[in-house]
Amino acid sequence: MNVLAYVHLRRLPRCTGVGRVIVELTERLAVRDDLDLRILAERGDYDRVRDELSEGVRSIPMKFFSLETSWQQARWLMLHLPKAEEYWSGCDVVWCPAESYVPVRKARLAVTVHDVACFEKGFPSSRGRTLQRLKWSVLFRVLERRAAAILTVSQFSAERIAHFFPGLAARVHIVRHGVPEQFLGPVSAAGEAATGRLGLNGVPFVLVPGGLSYRKNAPLILAAWALIGKKLPEVKLVVAGPSEAEWAGKAGEHGDSVRLLGYVGDETLHSLYSKAAVVWFPSRYEGFGMPVIEAMACGAPLVTTRAAAIPEVAGNAAVLLDPDQPGEHAEAILAFFQSSDLRNDYRRRAVERAAAFTWAQAVERLAAVLKGL
């Protein structure tokens, strides 16, 4: 079976979240004996990021289009030209590993949808959110007519896709993520050195992965931290990942008790997960929630929420709380600091739960769906 994967290469260097998923799945599909995988991508993207791509991605044969990605996507959505077969006449299946569309002549089209958050209520309105909703409304109407399969990452996301686009419900297949191998095993020397340079080795801290934004529940984080800081003034709040300017400014009001690290590499992140007294991920909405399984794989005590797909992923290996109750979050984090037995119990649960999520299982499921087309 010949699979043409349409990949936004610009998302892969220094990747987190969806970018990490694309790398894991494409690299693993590429080495299978039962299919031939090639990547379809923007030539300009490839030229810009080629040296930053993983060796596994660079080794996959590529087909290119010359237009800038957004213009190419618009052309495909509006004109349904050129067909995928123009790039590779032998392709049997076209797979888009993130929400997008490539028209096909005889090949079958499969598209991965990670979440449909832009259609959900309860988020602040913004120009960017409005534009995304308009763009994705067009995209999903096209997919309702032309996609042979929709892949998604959780039962929650499958139900929300069916809610907003009932015409897709019968074509939705669930392919859950796995634990990235770089978060398994002991922390590397480079990871130890990185946290040492950050001044965090031997310092008690709470880790918030994913940065500060409304979706990641920055208002609750800062409100709860004001309560925690009064009880644990020696503890630091360490935020890894990009933070929106508004919330970064408000975090600054907490002085040096809050550290905003921005993007950190995998070895540093592994060390942070492993050394944190508590990992705190109070997100309001996740189609899956990669930080949940990353933290669990590192054996971290985890405080998160009962929102969206998070309970489906965390199971009983994390403390699940209301995303609108900062007092509850403060109490849960304080409880971990007060009891080593509680910390050790959740560390054990976390490792056991993470073992249920493997990329080997994910790629087998993905390959089965693609073959079934």
Image (tube, grey):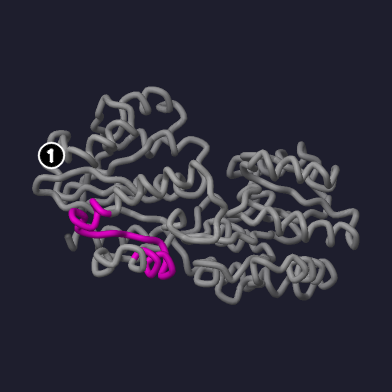
**Residue nearest the observer in this picture, 118 or 302:** 118
Q: Is residue 153 magenta?
A: yes
Q: Is residue 295 above or below residue 45?
A: below
Q: Quadrant location of the C terminus?
A: bottom left
Q: Position of residue 36 (x, y in %)?
A: 21, 45
Is residue 361 at all visible to an observer of this figure? no
> Quarter of the image holding residue 59?
top left
Q: Main secondary structure of the magenta part?
A: helix
Q: Residue at x 61, y 54 (%)?
A: 216
Q: Position of residue 301 (x, y in %)?
A: 69, 66
SS assignment at label 1: helix
Q: Position of residue 324 (x, y in %)?
A: 67, 66
The residue under label 1 is 85
Is residue 368 at all visible to an observer of this figure? yes
Left or right of 308 on screen, residue 333? right
Q: Is residue 225 above or below residue 56?
A: below
**Residue nearest the observer in this picture, 131 or 325:** 131
Q: Position of residue 33 (x, y in %)?
A: 23, 51
**Residue nearest the observer in this picture, 129 or 307:** 129
Residues in magenta? 141-161
Question: Mark 1: which amino acid?
Answer: Glu
Left or right of 167 on screen, residue 344? right
Q: Residue at x 82, y 44 (%)?
A: 253
Q: Is residue 331 magenta?
A: no
Mark 1 is surrounded, within 10 Å at the Cα level, by few (under 14), some (14 to 19) or many (20 or more) other residues, namely some
Q: Residue at x 60, y 59 (%)?
A: 283
